[in-house]
Image (tube, rainbow, N blue to C red):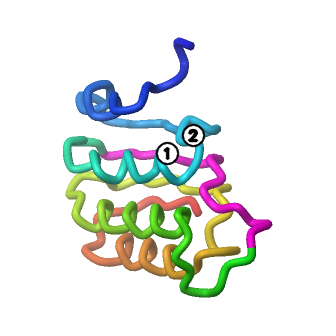
Amino acid sequence: GGDSIDEGSLASSLSQQDSIDLSDGQLSGPSRLLELSSQMSGFAITSLSISRNSFVDVSAPQPYNDASEANAAVLAFAGALAGHGTITSLDISDNGLGCKGQSGLVALMEAVGGGGKVTQLDV
């Protein structure tokens, strides 16, 4: 459909935008978050919204430092965010973060806190 983003097209379709909104299921699952993370360095954006995508399966049993695909995706996103120089506003709310895969959430908060680039955060 016209509203969906085809696999592999994130960088080409989003690289010229100042604000990216991939909320409400546009990044369905950990694989799409991994894709975004791998391409973020090409985005000269200041605002990123990836809310309401449910990266974490809250019903799956997972230990604190899990190695699930969801937590690996959040860790990859944290690394991409830490290395990104222009994002100042980030909305990652309503994704199930923190209830499972806490190590990813900790890494994400460290990425946001380190360097002081992000001045507006919604978790």
In the image, residue 90 above or below residue 104: above
State the image quarter where residue 3 is shown.
Answer: top right
Q: Residue at x 67, y 55 (%)?
A: 94
Residue 100 located left or right of residue 78: right
Furthest residue to the bottom?
A: 64
| Residue carrying label 1 | 49
Q: x%, y% of residue 25?
A: 62, 38
Residue 55 located left or right of residue 47: right
Q: Residue at x 27, y 34 (%)?
A: 11
Q: x%, y% of residue 18?
A: 30, 35
Q: Start and end of the magenta stretch?
A: 46-60
Residue 32 located left or right of residue 10: right
The dot on residue 23 is 2
Q: Main secondary structure of the magenta part?
A: loop
Q: Callout 2: 10 Å neighbours few (<14), some, many (20+)?
A: many
The one nearer the camera, 90 or 1, is 1
Amino acid, disc 2: Ser
Furthest residue to the right?
A: 59
Amino acid, disc 1: Ser
Find numbered disc 1 in the image and state the secondary structure of the residue it sits on.
Answer: strand
Q: Residue at x 22, y 64 (%)?
A: 83
Q: Quadrant of the N terminus?
A: top right
* Label total for image: 2
Asked if residue 52 is among those painted magenta in the image, a careful observer would answer yes
User: Do callouts 2 and 1 mark residues in contact (Cβ within 8 Å)?
Assistant: yes
Q: Residue at x 20, y 57 (%)?
A: 85
Q: x%, y% of residue 6?
A: 43, 25
Separation of marks 2 and 1 at Cα, in angstroms:
6 Å
